Image (tube, rainbow, N blue to C red):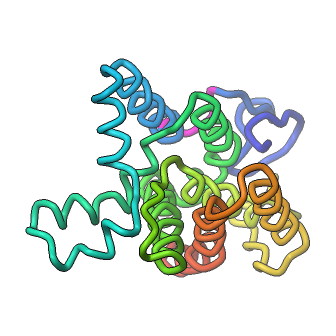
Amino acid sequence: MAFLQSGDGEGPYYHGQGRQVIADVPPVVFCLIGALAAAHIARMLMPVAMAEAALKAWSFVPAHVASVAGLAWPAAAKALATFLTYVFVQTSWSNLGIDCLLVLAFGPVVARRYGWAGFLLLFALGAVSGAALYLAVAPHSALLLAGGDGAVGCIALSAIRMIGPGFETSERPPLAPFYAGRVLFFAIAWMAAVAALVGGLAVLPIAGGILAAMVFPPLFERARP
């Protein structure tokens, strides 16, 4: 990945003698990884019953959100908050590890281009898009959604759109179009892998994150000075 490369070059992704090391990763990337890990560790330290209750309370469940109109405002606000909170509820250490590694691999590219606020906003938009697609397709589903698939997928595919010819030397290489070969390959391969390993509704949050990576980065580009 970009931050592990070495060699001579210029541009925003090169430092010192043209070398990149892990210390060059923007702090916001480490902060996000730390938040994901801290949330999971905290839940794992809870008694089993409390941990299960937290899983159910903060995961995204379409059936709960679909009935938000009939809820009192505290319950309605909590249900709407799960559009984001489900990202921090991991179902296993392996899922947490995969999410953190993907954020570490692709996050620096996005964070350096859009800054810490833009990086976090794009991560949140990926999360919301993943949950929203799940809600749209299965509004009455009681199966909970947990983990960062949508948000991480959005960050990863956005980074892939940013990496291309001129990446090492240009201050702002153009985004690859959503129909570019490498972009489509990554999107299709990721969804196919999840469909084969997990199947069913598990593809929906990833598809939502991928859609977010198609739609929002061009808007971010227009907003940049």
Query: From the viewer's perspective, is residue 28 above or below residue 11?
Result: above
- Residue at image coords 48%, 49%: 146
**Picture coordinates of residue 67, whole percent (x, y):** 26, 75
Q: Which residue is nearer to you in this view: 90 or 199?
A: 199
Q: Magenta-highlighted stretch: main secondary structure?
A: helix
Quarter in which the N terminus is drawn: top right
Q: Which residue is nearer to you in this view: 12 or 21?
A: 21
- Answer with left or right where residue 204 lies relative to residue 130: right
- Residue at image coords 45%, 55%: 144
- Answer with left or right where residue 73 lies relative to residue 23: left
**Picture coordinates of residue 106, whole percent (x, y):** 68, 48
- Answer with left or right where residue 113 lies relative to residue 73: right
Queried whether the magenta region covers residue 26, the answer comes back as yes
Residues shaded magenta: 23-27
Q: Which residue is nearer to you in this view: 12 or 1?
A: 1
How many marks the image carries: the answer is 0
- Residue at image coords 46%, 49%: 87
- Residue at image coords 36%, 18%: 45
